[in-house]
Image: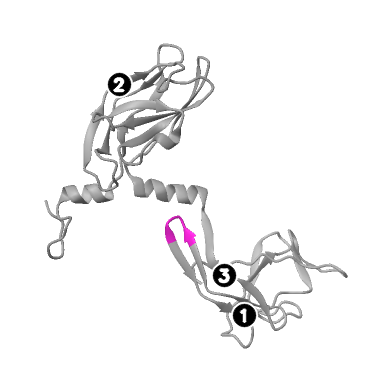
Amino acid sequence: VEPSHIGAATFDDLQDLINNTMSAGRTSGGLIEASSAAGNVKVNLGTGFIKITDSPNGLTRSFNWPNTIIVAGALPGNIIDKETNYIYIDYSAGVPVPKATTDRTTIELNRMFTLGRVYRDGVTLHIVNSGVNLYNHMRNNHERLIGVRGFERASGGVIAEKLVRYLTSTDGVFYLGANKIATTQQDTSPTGPPDILTRWYHDAGGNWVSNTGIEGASAAGQISNEHYDTPTGLADIGVARYGVFWLFIHFDG
């Protein structure tokens, strides 16, 4: 099978595509759990892809590995006491096998990949299954971005005062998960478009209401210097006091 290519391309078949775009990693199985013997670790059978040379473009092969026991002990490759033991698949000797090391820097990026980690405290094992998973990678990465980063600012969206209590904001770039969102500059002053400033506050019944026009002595587009919001309506800002206003822009604005 050949992907479409231009002229005499160096990489012109499906295997080349896999070699050049796929990392080594797990596709199924490989659960790490305590073995029946105290302190030992069982790595369950699994499947994956791995490169047979330590090169990011090396030949990438599919493979299976069997159930494997890694014993507790004090020698390199054992499950070492009072240490974090990294469990990984190693192809460097020509056959993919589960192994353990306390030095994560020795795990290569191409002929090896992690399955998780184990901290051994005597006969008690603290296990985290946290290796390189190839399946559904794009979706899982998007969900991670949503869960950890949420909606975040990349640049712009800077708010400033113009004239007296009118507002401007610069063009902004934001991300929601892996999605880029651009907002346009805003100017609520009479010399601007002017863009609309919508004020939100509670009425006497505790309901949210909005206003885009005059508010007391403040013109449309101005932040009020007379009132602040309370759960039961607007109240006067007293002498030597100030109001706090939260500003936001719609994704599509």
* Looking at the image, residue 117 lies above or below residue 234: above
Which of the labelled discs sits on residue 157, or is there none? 3
Residue 133: x and y in percent read: 35, 39
Color scheme of the displayed model: one colour
Query: Which residue is the extreme one toward the bottom?
Result: 191
Answer left or right for 114 relative to 244: left
The spot of residue 34 in percent (x, y) is 43, 19
Side of 116 where 9 appears, left or right: left
- Please state which amino acid type lies under the numbered disc 2: Asn
List x then y, in percent, for residue 150: 51, 53
The location of residue 219, given as percent across then percent down, is: 70, 82
Q: Which quadrant holds residue 200?
A: bottom right
**Label 1 sits on residue:** 188
Range drawn in magenta: 175-179
Q: Which label number is shown at residue 61?
A: none
Q: Is residue 176 left or right of residue 50?
A: right
Helix, strand or loop status at disc 1: loop
Residue nearest the observer in this picture, 234 or 43: 43
Is 178 within the magenta? Answer: yes
Label 1 crowd bin: few (<14), some (14–19), many (20+), radius 10 Å: many
Distance Cα–Cα, label 1 vs label 3: 14 Å
What secondary structure is the magenta-colored segment mainly?
strand
Q: Looking at the image, do the residues carrying marks 1 and 3 touch, with CB atoms under 8 Å apart? A: no
Give the CA separation, mark 1 to mark 2: 67 Å
Q: Amino acid at mark 1?
A: Thr
| Residue found 23% across the figure and 30% down from its top | 94
Select label 1 or label 3 by which is in front.
3
Which residue bears the numbered disc 2? 67
Among numbered discs 1 and 2, the one appearing first in the sequence: 2
Regarding mark 2 in the picture, which secondary structure is present there?
loop
Q: For this rendering, which residue is in front, 137 or 7?
A: 7
